[in-house]
Image: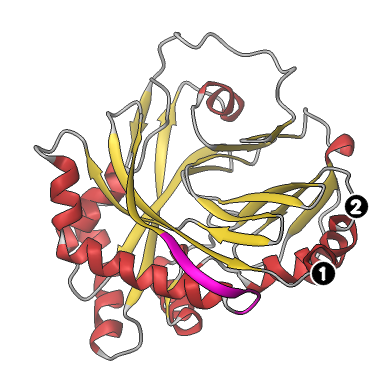
Amino acid sequence: MTWIDARTAASRINSWGKHSGAFFFLISYDKSKCLVERVSDISDTELLFDFPHLSNSAKVETPDSQASFTWQPHPLTALEYSKRFSIIHQNMLAGNSYLTNLTCKTPIDTSLTLKEIFMRSKARYKLWLNDRFVCFSPETFVRINQGVISSCPMKGTISCSVANAEQVLMDDVKEAAEHATIVDLIRNDLSKVAEKVTVRRYRYVEKLHTNCGDILQTSSEIAGVLPADYRSHLGDIIMAQLPAGSITGAPKRKTMEIIHQAEGYDRGFYTGVAGVCQGGKLDSCVLIRFIDKENGKFYFKAGGGITAKSDCKKEYEEVIEKTYVPIC
């Protein structure tokens, strides 16, 4: 596999998108590191992916799905988180951002390997890069099929252990405002490349099963119509949407500067995107629910959207809630 820059990646996707062969792409958060490879050229000892309509992991031996395992996160203290939250909040008071996705890296101890996590997890999108990271994402970035592009940003999380969890989530003023903001941002992003952009579904609820208990999350579906020659421009279309609105905020450019200041670490491939394309049909995900391996240690990267109505304690608890593996 060969790493390439964003311009080369876009050009390759543009070229290959016109043909029927299957290919895979991976793009880091800042677009500085990209991979675009034909599926037939990817070794399953280097990279594994399992997406709804395409996978290269079917022949890989699956470990015992019932075997017990250890899982111990070591999250930031509430005080450490509050310092980062305060940077975001001060920028909001100054009018620099009205939605910011603040993330953290949490050291974890587990008896599982990255590959075992990939094989045992249940998720819509799964990705493993040998000795680098594993991702089990529930969030669609963009889908493209028969001239229609759609995106399904995910905003709003609650534990199913909360009484009347779904109603509490839907009635939460902060969550509703955050979701409305991100839908508007994604609608604007799609309008750069498509016409007749509309919201097909708004704040629908999905349940996710994890080793720490079930959680509910809300998403929306926004879609638009691409130009007739879209298959010749798939790479340009993807790059025009990056970085994903759901993991940055609004306004996007200034908010990314605030994120860099507050987080204090390099996201790398976390909150980047990965996707597959075959015969002009493209499906991709945002790389959330993500475990990195750095210097032999595992770090779980997770976060959430901050608005002017956010409560620091609740946001801190949400980050901890998202530090899970979807293994039951």
**Marked residue nearer the N-terminal end (1 or 2):** 2
Q: Is residue 143 left or right of residue 9?
A: left
In the rendering, at what x and y percent does residue 78 appear?
20, 55
Q: Is residue 306 visible?
A: no
Q: Which residue is mark 1?
A: 229
Q: Which SS does the magenta portion mostly show?
A: strand
Is residue 199 rendered magenta in the image? yes
Q: Which residues are magenta?
A: 192-200
Residue 66 in sight from this viewpoint: yes
Give the side of residue 43 with respect to residue 124, left or right.
Answer: right
Viewer-proximal residue among 92 and 225:
225
Q: Is residue 280 left or right of residue 66?
A: right
Q: Quadrant of residue 266?
A: bottom right
* Residue at x 74% of width, y 72% of height: 227
Residue at x-position 18% and y-position 63%: 312
Query: Measured along the vertical axis of the image, is residue 45 above or below residue 218?
Result: above
Task: Verify CB contact (< 8 Å) between mark 1 and mark 2.
Answer: no
Q: Nearer the viewer, mark 1 or mark 2?
A: 1
Magenta stretch contains residue 88:
no
Residue occupied by mark 2:
19
Residue type indicated by callout 2: His
SS for tag 1?
Answer: loop
State how far apart marks 1 and 2 are (Cα): 13 Å
